[in-house]
């Protein structure tokens, strides 16, 4: 695979599992040095092993993105180790608890907002100054198809993902003339631990989710990762402010 990100540094939050892991590995395969950030490191250290198998360097940084001090520390550790930051995939997120709007608790609302929305804002707040030093950079925020349409029973999650799309578009306009592109990906039904939690691994419930997809299957984390690394690459140099669905045609129908 062509090393299009050689000598570049990529940060992936929520990088220990699922879409984050697949994206961290995809960056590494293309030559990037990778910072894997997460509030929990996978016990088998699988993400780091996969990155190292590509021949790229990587570090793991513990970070709860809802805390400003932890986010600042994450960026400081990135710069201390690699000296720069070129790309960021702000992927850390939680689905929160399922409940209709009037049954959603304040605790669930605040926690979901803290990770999914405040967390992305805090990350961008610390990432952008580093990219400004390079006069170039690319940020991809992980939204969701739930940032484009409504989903009953997940009011906090849907609200955060719509807000991420708005925040992405705003930052894209703010930094377009300073060499920083900001986009979002909007995954559909992707086979990750989040989907397993929502379905309880019940085959009938899984079929309901699969039937929602025009392609008749769930997506794979690697398919989202390919969209992320493309948006960060020079091949997407004239693309900013986009909320790209990676959803098997879900919102088309």
Image (cartoon, helix red, strand yellow):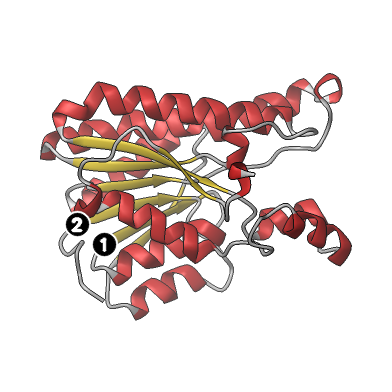
Find residue 36 and report its horizontal and vertical position in percent.
41, 56
Residue 10 visible within the image: yes
Q: How many marks?
A: 2
**Tag 2: Cα neighbours inside 10 Å, few (<14), some, or many (≥20)?**
some
Q: Which mark is residue 33?
A: 1
Mark 2–mark 1 Cα distance, whole angstroms, equals 6 Å
Residue located 52% across and 58% down the image:
19
> Which is nearer the eye, 136 or 214?
214
Q: Could you say whether the residue bearing mark 2 is in a helix, strand or loop?
A: loop
Find residue 21 and report its horizontal and vertical position in percent.
48, 62
Res 219 → quadrant = bottom right
Find residue 77 and report its horizontal and vertical position in percent.
30, 47
- Residue farthest toward the front in the current orientation of the protein: 253
**Tag 1: Cα neighbours inside 10 Å, few (<14), some, or many (≥20)?**
many
Quadrant into which the N terminus falls: bottom left
Determine contact: label 2, label 1, CB under 8 Å: yes
Find residue 217 and report its horizontal and vertical position in percent.
67, 64
Res 126 → quadrant = top left
Say above or below: 156 vs 136: above
> Which is nearer the eye, 23 or 47?
23
Residue 114 visible within the image: no
Residue located 18% across and 47% down the image:
84
Q: Tell me if 26 is positioned left or right of 222 in this view.
A: left
Q: Could you say whether the residue bearing mark 1 is in a helix, strand or loop?
A: strand
Say above or below: 128 vs 1: above
> Which is nearer the eye, 47 or 229?
229
Residue located 81% across and 25% down the image:
104
Quadrant into which the C terminus falls: top right
Residue located 42% across and 69% down the image:
48
Q: Which residue is mark 2?
A: 8
Q: Answer with mark 2 or mark 1, whichever residue precedes in sequence.
A: 2
Q: Tell me if 203 is positioned left or right of 7 in this view.
A: right
């Amino acid at each position: 695979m062509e090393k299009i990100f050689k000598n570049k540094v990529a940060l992936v939050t929520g990088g220990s599992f699922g879409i984050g892991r697949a994206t961290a590995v995809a960056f590494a395969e293309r030559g990037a040095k990778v910072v894997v950030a997460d509030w929990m490191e996978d016990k088998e250290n699988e993400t780091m092993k996969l990155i190292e198998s590509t021949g790229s360097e990587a570090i793991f940084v513990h970070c709860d993105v809802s805390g400003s001090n932890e986010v600042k520390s994450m960026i400081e550790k990135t710069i201390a180790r690699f000296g720069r930051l070129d790309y960021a995939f702000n992927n850390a997120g939680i689905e929160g608890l399922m409940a209709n709007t009037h049954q959603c608790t304040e605790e669930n609302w605040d926690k979901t907002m803290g990770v999914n929305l405040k967390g992305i804002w805090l990350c961008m707040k610390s990432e952008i100054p580093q990219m400004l030093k390079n006069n170039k950079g690319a940020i991809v925020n992980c939204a969701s198809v739930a940032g484009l349409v409504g989903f009953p029973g997940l009011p906090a999650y849907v609200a955060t993902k719509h807000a991420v799309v708005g925040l992405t578009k705003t930052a894209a306009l703010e930094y377009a003339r300073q060499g920083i592109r900001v986009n979002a990906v909007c995954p559909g039904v992707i086979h990750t631990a989040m989907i397993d939690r929502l379905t309880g691994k019940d085959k009938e419930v899984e079929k309901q989710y699969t039937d929602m997809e025009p392609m008749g299957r769930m997506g794979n984390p690697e398919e989202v990762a390919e969209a992320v690394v493309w948006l960060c690459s020079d091949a997407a140099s004239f693309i900013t402010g986009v909320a790209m669905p990676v959803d098997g045609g879900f919102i088309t129908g």
